[in-house]
Image (cartoon, rainbow, N blue to C red):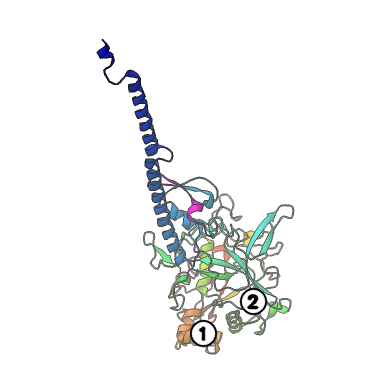
Amino acid sequence: MNQMKNTKGITLISLVITIIVLLLLAGVTMATLTGENGILTRASSAKTQTEIASIKEEIQTEILGEQAEKEGNISDHNLETILLKYGTLSNEEKLIDKTLTTTKGNHEIKVSDIFKGKLMIADKSGANPPNLNKIAQKTYVTWNLEEEKAEYVINDKQTVEPEYWYDYEKGKWANIKTSNSGLEAYWVWIPRYEYVVPTSTLATQIEVKFISKNQTTPDTDKNYIIHPAFTNEGNGGLGELDGIWVAKFEAVSSTPTVPNGGGDNPNLKVQVIPNQPSWRTTQTNNIFSVCRRMTKEGEVLAGSTIDSHMMKNTEWGAVVILSQSKYGVYNPESMNGEKGNKEYQIWNNPSSAYITGSVGTGKDTSSTVSKYNSVNGPKASTTGTVYGVYDIAGGAWEYVAGVLKGEIDELEYAKSKFDISNQEKPNGMTELDFVKKYLDLYDYRESTTDYSQYIIGDATVETKKWNVDYADFVCVDNPIFIRGR
């Protein structure tokens, strides 16, 4: 018995203690591997962070590529398009406040962590951002409706781009103002687009799709054509255009109160402002000259390196065709059009006083009663909103740079009506190249109703006589195009 008591072995207590120690050691090991700061957790977190960083880098590379094509700019529409390639977005109103849930890994990444730059605006139309790099002395223009004043109140002193500066889907075209030497001018951006040529003789909606500067071949599925105002050929061989700036109102001279708003005085300077007598009874030679020199010192575009010129017939057509699209008077914010009325006619600027930006009491009334920014004023705009182009219907008849070819010398009328021989020609251009850049040439004809040789995109046939517009074609008796009413 005594010998048995003295035998060495593991007691129950020591066994229990050993098991507890082993369990404690196992717990420590598991915590080390899987705890909040465990090896496996940290490894998984590192893998997740690496995956997120890789996705962010891939997205940011694509964003930089888009910005490189748009001179450093990117719209929130284009940014959103890129982000949606990688997952889904949350429902916050502003894109920068949204969260991206990625398809790969189901990670949640704040958009503000991916993109820290400045978005152009909240436009989702796909329109090219306004090209501003070559324009000096500019401010951004927006309007507010103050109900107690029943008037759209302008804010045209903004030197920093407003967050919601434009939205083409809502008929809010981009507007700027240039100022210099006491002169002012308002301009509207017409982005590059392709469209389906309408076949109806009645006013109807035209299908328009905004496209990038790099797209030089139209979408053939619906017989789209790229509007010639933006093409290399339409630009005289000087390259494709991402858009054009056009005057918001009819031209006003630097001395608008003289008879005819300035008359045939080549020494006056151009302004583009509302509520003033439009500049009339001017020879096309002088119109062409004063528009070409608008970037010279003392002019309203002084310091700018853009190519100012008298509006070509095709450029006028670009505005009119866009006005008849879902981005023009057919947009959801348009004041034009009544229920059951599919014309959405742009209201007339009555010619009784030739006041820029005016609107009558109805579509075709002859009395001037309202300013462009009054309650009814936007009905005379190409968008049915205050952000469109005015005086496109009504006001003074408008000469545009579209001219008949001579019967023998094809530049006969170009030389005699626009004095191209005395014009400063960029890049050593020949007279013919100069004409192709700044004038639309039409084959010789003898009838104002012969439309057979129209230039597609000039709106002489696409929208002929829509909105009761003047529609005579150029001929030997009237060799220069007149547009409007």
**Which of pointers 2 and 1 lies earlier in the amino acid sequence?**
2
Using the image, determine if residue 110 lies above or below residue 191.
Answer: above
Residue pictured at 54% horizontal, 56% vertical? 122
What stretch of residues is rendered in magenta?
100-116
Residue 101 is situated, as x and y percent measured from the top left of the image, at 44, 46
Question: How many residues crowd around disc 2 within 10 Å: few (fewer than 14), some, or many (20 or more)?
Answer: many
Quadrant of the drawing holding the C terminus: bottom right
For the residue labelled by badge 1, is the local secondary structure a helix, a strand or a loop?
Answer: helix
Using the image, determine if residue 154 lies above or below residue 482.
Answer: above
Residue 150 is situated, as x and y percent measured from the top left of the image, at 72, 55
Residue 252 is situated, as x and y percent measured from the top left of the image, at 67, 75
Q: Return the residue found at the far front.
A: 2
Q: Nearer the viewer, mark 2 or mark 1?
A: 2
- Left or right of residue 452, residue 483 in this image: right
Q: Are marks 2 and 1 in contact (CB under 8 Å)?
A: no
Report how far apart the C-alphas of labels 2 and 1 lie in the structure. Answer: 27 Å
Please name the residue that numbered disc 2 is placed on. Answer: 300
Residue pictured at 55% horizontal, 66% vertical? 189
Looking at the picture, which amino acid does disc 1 mark?
Ala
Residue 182 colored magenta? Answer: no
Determine which quarter of the picture holds residue 218. Answer: bottom left
Determine which quarter of the picture holds residue 455. Answer: bottom left
- Left or right of residue 217, residue 332 in this image: right
Looking at the picture, which amino acid does disc 2 mark?
Val
- Left or right of residue 386, residue 104 in this image: left
Please name the residue that numbered disc 1 is placed on. Answer: 414
Residue 190 is situated, as x and y percent measured from the top left of the image, at 53, 66
- Left or right of residue 178, residue 3 in this image: left
Quadrant of the drawing holding the N terminus: top left
Whether residue 405 appears in this view of the structure is: no
